[in-house]
Image (cartoon, rainbow, N blue to C red):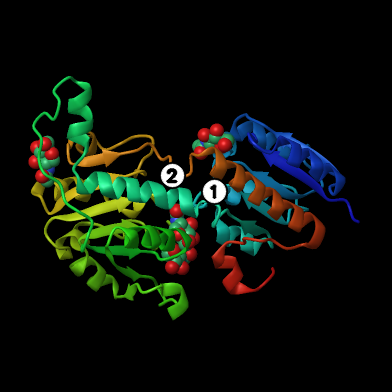
Amino acid sequence: MTQRAALLIGALTHTRKEWEQIRSIASKLYEYPSGTREEFISKCKSGAFDGIYALYRSNDSNKYTGNFNDELLDVLPKSLKFICHNGAGYDNIDVPACTKRGISVSSTPIAVDDATADVAIFLMLGALRNITHSFQAVRQGKWRGNFALGHDPKNKVLGILGMGGIGSAVAHRAKAFGMKIQYHNRKQLPAEKEEGSKYVTFDELLETSDVLSLNLSLNASTRHIIGKDEFDKMKDGIIIVNTARGPLIDEAALVDALKSGKVWSAGLDVFEEEPKIHPGLLEAENVVLLPHMGTATYETQRDMELLVLDNLKAALQSDTLLTQVPEQKQESARI
Ligand SMILES: *[C@@H]1O[C@H](CO)[C@@H](O)[C@H](O)[C@H]1NC(C)=O
Ligand SMILES: *[C@@H]1O[C@H](CO)[C@@H](O)[C@H](O)[C@H]1NC(C)=O
Ligand SMILES: *[C@@H]1O[C@H](CO)[C@@H](O)[C@H](O)[C@H]1NC(C)=O
Ligand SMILES: CC(=O)N[C@H]1CO[C@H](CO)[C@@H](O)[C@@H]1O
């Protein structure tokens, strides 16, 4: 086989042994466990990673390299053909710029579906019960405090924006609570994948949902897909759940909608400027907040690391990826 080295950026927690086994199929293993973007760039320029064919981008690697944009892609060795990213969202990788250079990119859908859907349901139930006040009151020795009644999920219409792997896992769970499911995607799913969910237009989704759950990727065309105009179209008293990406929602408009009562409550795992949270959300009692921990379970973190390694192996051994990002799959089966 030709010289095919692999590079690990960031750390592995659960699959160190499996990474070492890659040694048998790669000509060399490099690591960049931590550092700054400047250091990374200067290492690339000095030839420290020459010959890398595929790289593993760990879940915390963005801290050490920053976004994979033109500046970084320009200095990475020309031998690089595959980027295997650990995460369902990959908005910190400029995919069109990779495509232009003939670099294929994979992410970790599927492995994240159940854990993220669990958190979406947790946040939805918390938002339906307006649970934040009670959580705080009981710890402060105030028992129920200034307790107010919540809502049942049963017979409510759950609107899912982005019915992919996670969206479907949310739908599956929500049905068990007696909810009616409708969704919007760019394209309607084949009937067997809909599992009884109703396909509606974007406007219908906004106008007729009692609860709206966001599960779509963030990119230039979905940034602020929910803003003031969209809140205006929604039913009064809607509940918003976001476990996808913060910038999908115009956070300032959400704060206004929570204050006016347009939005009854919200459950959020992601924020527009993480880890910074809009003060209006921190102050609001009718918001359930989590610090972006949708996939933070032992089982799921290990599954994600294994899926990245499987992509890396496929790249090194057969020039393919198991879970290539959809934007590239649409262009051609293989680039
Ligand atoms: C949520 O609970 C708080 C505390 O009980 C209450 O003040 C607030 O009115 C409730 N929110 C809604 C929208 O009912
Ligand atoms: C942005 O994401 C949406 C939702 O996942 C997708 O339909 C669309 O194709 C993406 N657009 C681009 C430019 O990648
Ligand atoms: C990255 O994965 C490791 C290992 O599972 C985990 O400890 C860590 O919390 C994760 N970090 C993020 C930002 O998800
Ligand atoms: C950011 C995020 O969690 N988005 C995911 C929602 O579901 C779609 C379809 O499965 C994925 O492609 C996104 O990555």
Relative depth, front residue between 98 and 130: 130
Q: CA distance from mark 2 to mark 1?
A: 11 Å
Would you say 113 lies left or right of 45 here? left
For image coordinates 22% across by 65% down, the residue present is 209
Image quarter in which the C terminus is found = bottom right
What residue occupies the far bottom of the structure in this picture? 191
In this rendered view, identify the residue nearer to me: 141 or 67.
141
Q: Describe the element under mark 2 as helix, strand or loop.
A: loop
Q: Which residue is mark 1?
A: 87
Amino acid type at image mark 1 = Gly
Q: Which is more foreground, mark 2 or mark 1?
A: 2
323 or 136, which lies in front? 136
Q: Compare marks 2 and 1 and give the one earlier in the sequence.
A: 1
Above or below, comparing residue 315 to residue 200 in the picture: above
Left or right of 10, for residue 236: left
Name the residue at 75% across, 48% down.
77
**Amino acid type, mark 2:** Gly
Residue at disc 1, secondary structure: loop
Q: Which residue is mark 2?
A: 294
